[in-house]
């Protein structure tokens, strides 16, 4: 591997998109750990930030240039990519969500109909050609045909990774069986996280003769938070659901360590997805927690005993049955799950794979 330097550039508001910024910083840290001098550069999403982003991209001197994809600006970025390739730079485009799914997110998130049509039009018209100059395209789930036309040979599909080098994680210390089953989720809470399914399932399990009560701690803020608060009241499960806001650092680690099971995104179907590489799943497992999720994750085979899979729809019956089955379940040890995270979910290993693909 002959690469000496890497710069990662993204139009990211680090104050509002904390998780995105953390992922980029961790990617850069993993690259540094592999001996490549790496830096991350964030630019605000306003007009001034865009101009600074384009200017910095054109002046980039690193051997490898990584760019976080943005559908609105990439028709402009296209010409800079050609310039970078002529300067013999290795260009990587990081696409966090398949563009075909991005279209569905535009439909949901953008309320102004004129701007919504404009955004969709830009995305459709840019198609796959805006990515043609790239050396490598990173995807985390299958892309739509229109957006991957002519790009198959330069696309690397992989799962998200977590930074594990020198990681001093607090491992799960909760005991099972117990008189309380503690579920936990960390998110910028949105509709597609599907946490309403958990609340509805708990409303049912409350009326069953289980030897334990089920509680659910939600960590974070988000657009869906108030709806979940109202739903918990409607269902009469307020005492089982703990909304504790944003937590970080040692406080977050202690809460995870005191829980039994992590809840991943249970509403992928609401984004039109059946495949995703959820970062929270990986963070839960680094803490020694088994996980409940839906759909396909490229880093887990179907028989993985750390990841419990329920149907990717609105149903709650399978979740209820799963919660009931925990009465006779011996969870894998925290150390075993943590070891799996280190060996299979390491960001360092994934970045090294990217470098080998570029070589």
Image (tube, grey):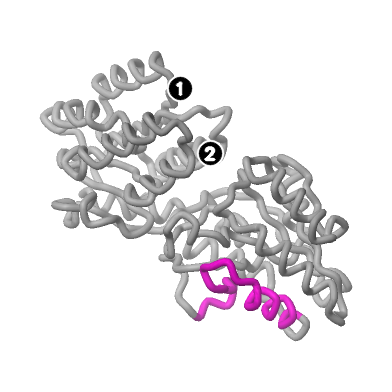
| Horizontal side, residue 287 vs residue 177: left or right | left
How many numbered marks have been drawn onto this rendered protein structure?
A: 2
Magenta stretch contains residue 138:
no
Picture layout, residue 317 above or below residue 171: below
- Element type at marker 1? loop
User: What's the CA distance linking mark 1 and mark 2?
Assistant: 15 Å
| Horizontal side, residue 108 vs residue 182: left or right | left
Mark 2 surroundings within 10 Å by alpha-carbon count, few (fewer than 14), some (14 through 19), many (20 or more): few
Q: Specify the segment rendered in magenta.
A: 303-326
Residue 181: x and y in percent read: 80, 69
Residue located farthest toward the top when viewing the structure as drawn = 48
Seen at 44% across and 26% down, the residue is 42
Picture layout, residue 93 above or below residue 213: above
Picture layout, residue 357 above or below residue 105: below
- Element type at marker 2? helix
Residue 206: x and y in percent read: 84, 72
Q: Report the front residue among 26 and 82.
A: 82
Report which quarter residue 35 is drawn in. top left
Residue located farthest toward the front when viewing the structure as drawn = 113
Q: Are marks 1 and 2 in contact (CB under 8 Å)?
A: no
Which numbered circle lies on residue 44? 1
Seen at 29% across and 41% down, the residue is 93
Mark 1 surroundings within 10 Å by alpha-carbon count, few (fewer than 14), some (14 through 19), many (20 or more): some
Magenta stretch contains residue 324:
yes
Residue 332: x and y in percent read: 66, 76
The residue labelled by disc 2 is: 22
Seen at 21% across and 43% down, the residue is 127
Q: Earlier in the sequence, mark 1 or mark 2?
A: 2
Residue located farthest toward the bottom when viewing the structure as drawn = 328
Which numbered circle lies on residue 11? none
């Amino acid at each position: 591997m002959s690469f000496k330097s890497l710069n990662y550039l993204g139009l990211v508001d680090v104050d509002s998109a904390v998780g995105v910024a953390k992922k980029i910083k961790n990617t850069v840290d993993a690259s540094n750990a592999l001996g490549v001098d790496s830096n991350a550069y964030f630019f605000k999403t306003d007009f001034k930030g865009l101009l600074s982003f384009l200017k910095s991209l054109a002046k980039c001197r690193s051997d490898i240039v990584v760019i976080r994809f943005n559908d609105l600006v990439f028709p402009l970025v296209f010409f800079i990519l050609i310039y970078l390739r002529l300067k013999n730079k290795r260009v990587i485009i990081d696409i966090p969500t398949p563009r075909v799914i991005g279209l569905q997110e535009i439909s949901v998130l953008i309320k102004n109909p004129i701007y919504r049509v404009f955004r969709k039009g830009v995305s459709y018209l840019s198609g796959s050609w805006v990515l043609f100059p790239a050396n490598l395209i990173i995807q985390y789930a299958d892309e739509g045909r229109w957006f991957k036309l002519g790009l198959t040979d330069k696309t690397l599909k992989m799962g998200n990774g977590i930074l594990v080098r020198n990681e001093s994680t607090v491992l799960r210390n909760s005991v099972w069986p117990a008189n309380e089953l503690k579920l936990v989720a960390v998110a910028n809470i949105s509709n597609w996280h599907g946490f309403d399914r958990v609340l509805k399932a708990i409303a049912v399990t409350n009326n069953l003769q289980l030897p334990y009560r089920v509680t659910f701690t939600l960590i974070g803020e988000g657009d869906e938070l108030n709806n979940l608060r109202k739903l918990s009241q409607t269902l009469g499960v307020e005492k089982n659901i703990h909304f504790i806001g944003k937590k970080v650092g040692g406080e977050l680690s202690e809460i995870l360590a005191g829980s039994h099971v992590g809840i991943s995104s249970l509403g992928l179907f609401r984004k039109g997805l059946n495949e995703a590489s959820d970062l929270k799943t990986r963070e839960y497992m680094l803490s020694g927690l088994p996980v409940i999720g839906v759909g396909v994750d490229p880093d887990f085979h179907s028989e993985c005993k750390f990841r419990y899979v329920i149907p990717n729809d609105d149903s709650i019956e399978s979740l209820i049955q799963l919660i009931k089955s925990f009465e006779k379940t011996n969870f894998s040890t925290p150390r075993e799950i943590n070891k799996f995270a280190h060996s299979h979910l390491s960001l360092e290993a994934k970045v090294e794979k990217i470098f080998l693909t570029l070589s």
